[in-house]
Image: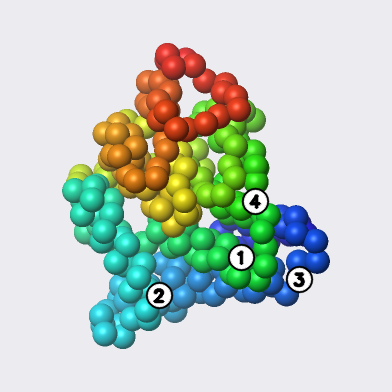
Amino acid sequence: MRRVEHVMGFPVSLRVDDEGFPESAADDLFAWLREVDARFSPFRKDSEVSRLDRGDLGPGGLSPELTEILDLCERYRIATGGAFDVRLPGRRLDPCAVVKGWSVQQGADLLTAAGARRFCLNAGGDVVAAGGPWRVGVRHPEHVDRLCTVLPLTDGAVATSARYERGDHILDGRTGRPATGLLSLTVVAPTLTEADAVATAAFALGREGIDWAAARPGCEVFAVDADRRVVRTSGFRTTGTALSRTPA
């Protein structure tokens, strides 16, 4: 089974290699992602996130799912000393950095519960996979038609934070200004919930985020800093790279 839909502002592609896997399970996956977009997008005036931000909802009126998302956001805010913060002064509440990975991982869990054993779910370049090996390409931070590395992924997730899609959209919560020091940072972790949040939080930290992410249990890191130097942890396995360890 192969399927692609545009959800939450980016393409989501699904490939399931299990024979006889029901189409209805894929329907459930994409329905879940559309529900997440409706409920937790800060860009929708009627979403739960927007209503909370306006003060139309009190803490006691939050759904268990949004409570979980905000708890994760607070955990990473504390862990980064405030560099990762979804509640910057003068800006709307924006938990998208956690919502994306969390919701896609929940979707992958739905696939597993429906009987999928070998699948790859790609949400705007962030991937959760099972039953590999799969080959996951990491885009070059400066050249749209090049990869900077390709990694094998069996069971787990990979997420990248960078400037190339949305410019300086990741802010350092300690200063309120765009994060500096890195061109891109990729994290491999057991779940996309963690991989996506760690990648964004580490990018917000700048260069110090490389060591911070590498110290997270179960995480491996591949980063390109602002001087175009490549840093990778010893457990980050690759099948090829197009960047050297020295400035380009």
Q: Nearer the viewer, mark 4 or mark 3?
A: 4
- Residue 65 circle label: 2
Picture quadrant where residue 185 is located: top left
Question: Helix, strand or loop at disc 1?
Answer: helix
Residue at 22% across, 59% down: 89
Relative to 53, say whether 8 is above or below. Answer: above
State the image coordinates of residue 59 (x, y, percent, origin top left): 25, 80
Q: Nearer the viewer, mark 1 or mark 3?
A: 1
Q: Say whether disc 1 or disc 2 marks the residue closer to the N-terminus.
A: 2
Mark 1, other Cα within 10 Å: few <14 / some 14–19 / many ≥20: some
- Residue corresponding to mark 3: 22
Q: Say whether disc 3 or disc 2 marks the residue closer to the N-terminus.
A: 3
- Residue corresponding to mark 1: 112
Quadrant of the drawing holding the N terminus: bottom right
Question: Helix, strand or loop at disc 3?
Answer: loop
Distance (Cα) linking label 1 and label 2: 20 Å
Residue at 40% across, 20% down: 229
Q: Nearer the viewer, mark 3 or mark 2?
A: 3
Q: Is residue 26 left or right of residue 91?
A: right
Relative to 36, say whether 98 is above or below. Answer: above
Identity, as a three-letter code, of the amino acid under mark 1: Thr
Residue at 40% across, 43% down: 219
- Residue corresponding to mark 4: 131
Relative to 77, say whether 103 is above or below. Answer: below
Residue found at the far bottom of this picture? 61
Q: Is residue 148 left or right of residue 28?
A: left
